[in-house]
Structure formats: structure tokens, C-alpha cells
Image (cartoon, rainbow, N blue to C red):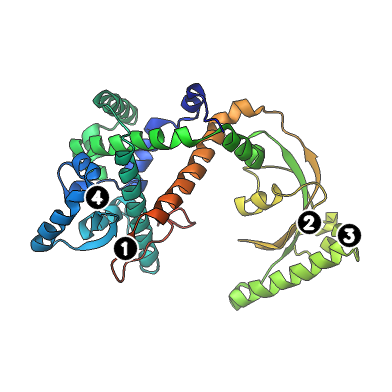
């Protein structure tokens, strides 16, 4: 398979300023290497130095919470990651464990990426970093802010910012050549309804569990919905008849009909995402939203008219994330990763990743 032509890769590149604002203020925590060694590039390129460094760290009383290959992640790295992820907000006590685990996951992933960037000699020039700093400064000025204020909020000095930018620029250079036209075709097929304006005419049946009864009530409603679905599939009744008989929503008076729905903006994502997985005439399996347990059926499709080229950048960004995650899984399989007892990593992309 051929990789995408360079002009296509440029079109797919995420908007740098907004991603930088998000990554520095919220998501990325890329100073772990800086806390271990003032020269991050040298450390990333020379894994062999870590054995001697480990002795120095032990003498200095540095607490190592994890090792990724020969890279050590310290308690200080984790504390910095937690400060950045929280953005100064208080994390609820019942979310603390998950929050810490997600920060550890980010640190591990960044260590893996830094190692690959060094091994593959992905180069970022000072000119590229200077341009990014200038873009950030210009963006901040439009928000009545300054670079110094931004650095203070992010907990960075200018050198730290430049090193973070080096990493931010290097990651797309590492991953984008791996994205092929096959990836783009596959992602377009899966996500075209997100962007092309397609509308689905859907009907649904909603069962509302007793909120005071706890998880058991939801499980009971799921079981009941499965039985209703089985009856529909066995042609014991039509979907419209089942809606009139069982649905707790006002649409039961119309056989469950909700009319034509856009992919985004009208109903909850939990509902719309399930509906847009269906083909015309298909009845969904039971699924849960904040409003109850649902069955859905698509009765008609109004095809979108937006051509794929118009949303190629968005498709490219989705493909980028998919390829990045596949690459990280490969790195995890070949790299020894050890966590200190009591430390765990939790997928930071899972729902509820931030307070």
C-alpha cells in the first residue's frame, strides 16, 4: 500500500494553534524527560545512559513510579501531569484513582513516542519551533492574553514550551507517513455520515427504568428490550406495534416515529451514534442513554450531498488517531513497561477522562 502524497498529508494536518492550546493546557504532559535531565534530546537518544542515571536518582531520593524501556518516570513527572490535567480544578474524591491512572497512561505513551521519535531520527528544526511560538503568541493576543500568562497557566518556562512544541511537531511527522489511502477509504466509509449531511428517519422504543432501583433496574429493562426485539425479528409484531404497546415515550402514538434526524445536534450522541450505525430496515440491539433503554429502527434514509473531499481533513484527523493508537499498541508490545506497585495506568481516552 502506498502512503498518502505529501500534499494530502498537509491537508490533513490538524490546526496547530488550537491543538497546541489544548495539548499544553489540558492533555499533554511532555516534560517528564525534562525533570530527569536538563537535556531531553540527549536523554531520548541515549537510552544507555539510564543505568548510570538510575544510581544518581536513587542517591538523590527520586521516586521512580514506572519504567518504559530504559526511561524512568518519576513521582515529580506524575505530579506535574496531574496539575496540568486538572487545570487547577479540584478532582472529586471518587475520581482520584481514575484520574491518576489516566495521567500515568499519558506519561507512558509519551515516553514510547519520544523513544520512537529518537530512534527514527525525526527532526524538528528551530525554525519550525520559532514559527509555532510566533503563531501561539499571535493567537493569544487575539484572546487578550500573552505568552507569559500562558506559560504561567501551563506551568512552563520558555525552554519547556519549546521542548513541548518540538514533541508536538515531531509526533505528526512520525505518524503521518504511516497513513495510507486505504486508511482514508476505511475511515470515510465508517464516518461519512458524521460529515456528509445524511439524515436518518428513525423510530424508537424507550423503556424507563426506576432510577431509585439502581443498576438492577437497567439490567431488567435491557432484558425486557431484548425480548421485545426478538418478538419483532420473529415477526410476532411490527416495530410500530411494539412501540405503541411498550414504549414509555410520547412517540409511541406515532409508532415510535421520530422523523428525520441529523447525525449531530438534535438528539444525544448516545442515541444518534447508535441510529447512524444502522441500515434501512434494521432494528438495533438494546442500548442505554441517560433517558432509558432504547430499541431503534431506521425506516428511511435521506442521503447527504457533501462530497468526501470537503471533509477530508476531518477524516484525516480520525485516521491519524486510529493509526497513532495502533502504533502505540505495537510499541507497548515490544517495550518492557513496569509500574511501581500501587501505580496503574488507565486509558485516558475513555469517557470521563477529565474532571
Q: In percent of the image, x 47 and y 24: which residue is there?
A: 6
Residue 88, label in figure: none
Task: List the single residue furthest toward the right.
Answer: 236
- Which is nearer the N-term, disc 2 or disc 3? 3
Residue 323, position in %: x, y?
Answer: 49, 42
Residue 238, label in figure: 3
Nearer the observer, 21 or 32: 32
Q: Which residue is mark 2?
A: 283
**Which circle, 3 or 1, is nearer the viewer?**
1
Q: CA distance from mark 4 to mark 2?
A: 49 Å
Q: CA distance from mark 2 to mark 3?
A: 11 Å
Q: Which residue is mark 4?
A: 32
- Which is nearer the N-term, disc 1 or disc 4? 4
Q: In percent of the image, x 30 and y 71: which residue is there?
A: 341
Res 255 visible: yes
Residue 99, position in %: x, y?
Answer: 37, 61
Is the residue marked by circle 4 packed among few (<14), some (14-19), or many (20+) residues within 10 Å? many
Q: CA distance from mark 1 to mark 4?
A: 16 Å
Q: Which residue is mark 1?
A: 338
Question: For residue 242, what is the image quadrant?
Answer: bottom right
- Disc 2 secondary structure class: loop
Amino acid at each position: 500500500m502506498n502512503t498518502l502524497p505529501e500534499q494530502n498529508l498537509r491537508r490533513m494536518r490538524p490546526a496547530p494553534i488550537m491543538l497546541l492550546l489544548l495539548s499544553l493546557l489540558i492533555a499533554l504532559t511532555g516534560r517528564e524527560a525534562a525533570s530527569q535531565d536538563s537535556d531531553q534530546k540527549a536523554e531520548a537518544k541515549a537510552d544507555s545512559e539510564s543505568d548510570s542515571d538510575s544510581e544518581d536518582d536513587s542517591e538523590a531520593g527520586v521516586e521512580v513510579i514506572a519504567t518504559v524501556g530504559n526511561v524512568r518516570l518519576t513521582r515529580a513527572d506524575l505530579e506535574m501531569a496531574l496539575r496540568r490535567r486538572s487545570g487547577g480544578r479540584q478532582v472529586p474524591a471518587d475520581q482520584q484513582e481514575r484520574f491518576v491512572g489516566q495521567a500515568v497512561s499519558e506519561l507512558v505513551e509519551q515516553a514510547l513516542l519520544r523513544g520512537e521519535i529518537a530512534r527514527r531520527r525525526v527532526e524538528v528544526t528551530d525554525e519550525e519551533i520559532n514559527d509555532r511560538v510566533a503563531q501561539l503568541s499571535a493567537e493569544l493576543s487575539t484572546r487578550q492574553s500573552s505568552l507569559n500568562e500562558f506559560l504561567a497557566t501551563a506551568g512552563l518556562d520558555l525552554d519547556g514550551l519549546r521542548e513541548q512544541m518540538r514533541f508536538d511537531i515531531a509526533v505528526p511527522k512520525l505518524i503521518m507517513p504511516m497513513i495510507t489511502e486505504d486508511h482514508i477509504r476505511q475511515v470515510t466509509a465508517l464516518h461519512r455520515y458524521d460529515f456528509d449531511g445524511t439524515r436518518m428517519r428513525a423510530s424508537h422504543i424507550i423503556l424507563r427504568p426506576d432510577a431509585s432501583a439502581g443498576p438492577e433496574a437497567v439490567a431488567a429493562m435491557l432484558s425486557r428490550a431484548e425480548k421485545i426485539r426478538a418478538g419483532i425479528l420473529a415477526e410476532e409484531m411490527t416495530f410500530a406495534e411494539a412501540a405503541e404497546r411498550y414504549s414509555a415515550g410520547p412517540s409511541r402514538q406515532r409508532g415510535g416515529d421520530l422523523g428525520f434526524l441529523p447525525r449531530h445536534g438534535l438528539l444525544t450522541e448516545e442515541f444518534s451514534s447508535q441510529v447512524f450505525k444502522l441500515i434501512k430496515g434494521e432494528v438495533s440491539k438494546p442500548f442505554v442513554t441517560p433517558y432509558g433503554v432504547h430499541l431503534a429502527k431506521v425506516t428511511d434514509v435521506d442521503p447527504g450531498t457533501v462530497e468526501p473531499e470537503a471533509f477530508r481533513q476531518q477524516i484525516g484527523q480520525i485516521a491519524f488517531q486510529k493509526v497513532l493508537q495502533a502504533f502505540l499498541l505495537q510499541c507497548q508490545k515490544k517495550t518492557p513497561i513496569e509500574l511501581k506497585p500501587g501505580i496503574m495506568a488507565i486509558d485516558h481516552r475513555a469517557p470521563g477522562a477529565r474532571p
